[in-house]
Amino acid sequence: MTLGRWAAVAGLLSALYFAFQGGEYSTSDLLQLRREAAEEETAVARLTVVVDSLTRVARAIEQDPRVQERVARERFGMLRKGEFLYRLVPAETNVSGNGNGLSGER
C-alpha cells in the first residue's frame, strides 16, 4: 500500500473512533446513562409501592372505625367506658442489696 492509502485508512479509522467515542458524549457515556436511567426507574417503582401502601393506611385511618379504634388504643392508650387499664410497672432495682426492696433506711 502506498503512503496515501495508509493515510486514508488512518483518517477513516480516526473518524470512526471519533464518531463512537469522541465529542461531548461518547458511547460509554450513553451506556452509563441508560444504566442509571434503569436504576432510577426501579427506584421509582419501589417508591410507588411504598406510597400506595401508605395511602391505603392513611385512608383506613381516616375512614375505617375499626382501624381508628385500634390506633386509639395502641398509640394513645385510650379506653372504652367501663374498661380498666392495668399497667405493669417494673420493680425498682434494689440499691442496698438487702433483698427486701427497701433502701436500707428506717
Image (cartoon, grey):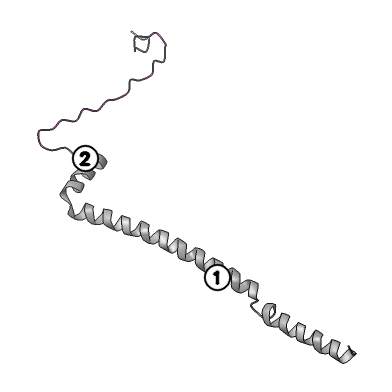
The mark closer to the camera, 1 or 2, is 1
Look at the image and say whether residue 11 sits in the magenta stretch. Answer: no
Q: Which residue is disc 2 drawn over?
A: 73
Residue type marked 2: Arg
Main SS, magenta residues: loop
Residue 79 picture location, percent across and down: 16, 37
**Res. 45 image quadrant:** bottom left
**Res. 47 image quadrant:** bottom left
Indicate which disc, 1 or 2, sits on the residue closer to the N terminus: 1
Task: Name the residue at the front extreme.
Answer: 1
Taking 56 as reference, is 49 left or right? right
Q: Residues within 10 Å of mark 2 (few under 14, many from 20)?
A: few
Q: Which residues are magenta?
A: 80-100
Above or below 18: residue 38: above
Above or below 104: residue 27: below
Residue type marked 1: Arg
